[in-house]
Amino acid sequence: QVQLVESGGGLVQAGGSLRLSCAAAGRTFSNCAMGWFRQAPGKEREFVAAISWSGANTGYADSVKGRFTISRDNAKNTAYLQMDSLKPEDTAVYYCAAENAPYSNWYRDAHEYRYWGQGTQVTVSS
């Protein structure tokens, strides 16, 4: 069992930055791949970024590649999403997710993640 609590969302102007955090409780955190997803009202949840539980392997949606960075600190049971050069189209509720996974694996399909945070709103003004 993994419980995830997200924080760090807010309102920012285009071109600005935010750092999202996902604090995890549960002894299986270090055994989990982590993902970040986002969902705007009326839209499908979309993949943003993911990281293997080793921390060595990452993947990004094309729309955020080069602007967002996913990371994790297993000792702190926390995953992060650093978002730079934010655009209005980045506006969404951002969710972190976790799933038990092999050491080097990460997933981009939301349905592959068992545990989810409550979401944090990110709003980017033009």
Image (cartoon, grey):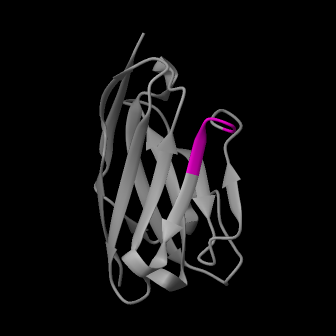
Q: Residue at x 35, y 24 (%)?
A: 12
**Residue 31 location in percent, x, y?**
53, 85
| Majority secondary structure in the magenta region | loop
Question: As drawn, which residue projects farthest toward the bottom?
Answer: 27
* Residue 27 appears left or right of 106: left
Whole-percent x and y of residue 85?
54, 26
Of residues 40 and 103, the one nearer the viewer is 103
> Which quarter shows the N terminus?
bottom left
Left or right: 42, with 85 as reference point = left
| Total count of labels | 0
| Residue shown at the point (58%, 41%) measured from the top left | 68
Q: Front-most of 92 and 23? A: 23
Magenta extent? 65-69
Residue 38 lies left or right of residue 76; in this view the side is right
Q: Which residue is found at the position 42% from the left and 27% from the top?
A: 91
Would you say residue 105 sits in the magenta stretch? no
Where is residue 123, by image quadrant? top left
Q: Let me know if residue 45 appears in the view.
A: no
Quarter that holds the C terminus? top left
Residue 96 % position (x, y):
42, 57
Front-most of residues 88 and 84 = 84
Q: Is residue 29 visible?
A: yes
Give the x, y percent position of residue 89. 50, 22
User: In the image as oriented, which residue stretches furthest toward the top?
Assistant: 126
